[in-house]
Amino acid sequence: MNLEKMKIRSNIVKINLKRVYDPASKEDGLRILIERLWPRGVKKEDLKMDEWLKEVAPSTDLRKWFSHDPAKWKEFQKKYFEELDENQVALEPILKALHKNSITLLYSSKDTEHNNAVCLRNYLEKHKKN
């Protein structure tokens, strides 16, 4: 299954974003960690999550290049979108979940505007409209 074969319906539930350090809530629905590395300072038994999709996270090289620098945001999005285009198999659990549940993408960045979760949601929303 890929985005060309399975376009995301426009009536799907909202894609929520939440830092791993914020408490879980009923409204979160399916909670998916989208970090390649385990978040600092969080015990595995303390993080309420349903899935950990490391493969959906930006590559190590891209993550290191970006280094959470807002000046690199546009280029980061472009490069991350290219990685997602090349790795659509990794998106399958998210695509399936979007048709059944609300989902919350969990991320660890302090920057709530320039992070991989924002970028992934933008990617999914972009393909929802096509």
Image: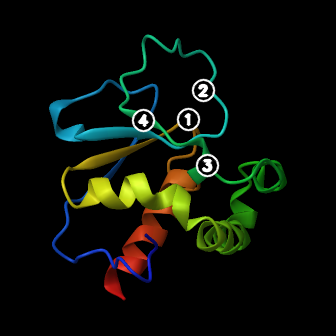
How much space separates mark 4 and mark 1, taking CA atoms?
A: 15 Å
**Residue closest to the eye, 119 or 91:** 91
Q: Quadrant of residue 49?
A: top left
The residue that mark 1 highlights is 108
Q: How many residues crowd around disc 2 within 10 Å: few (fewer than 14), some, or many (20 or more)?
A: some
The residue that mark 3 highlights is 55
How much space separates mark 2 and mark 1, taking CA atoms?
A: 6 Å
Q: Earlier in the sequence, mark 4 or mark 1?
A: 4
Give, as a three-letter code, the residue at label 3.
Answer: Glu
**Residue closest to the eye, 125 or 112:** 125
Residue 115 visible somewhere in the drawing: no
Pointers 2 and 1 in contact (C-beta within 8 Å): yes
- Disc number lying in front (4 or 1): 4
Say the numbered circle drawn on residue 39: 2
Q: Quadrant of residue 35?
A: top right
Say the numbered circle drawn on residue 125: none
Which residue lies at the image location 33% right of the left edge and 45% below the top edge?
104
Callout 4: SS: strand
Give, as a three-letter code, the residue at label 1.
Answer: Ser
Q: Earlier in the sequence, mark 4 or mark 2?
A: 2
Pointers 3 and 1 in contact (C-beta within 8 Å): no
Q: Position of residue 65 (x, y in %)?
A: 84, 55
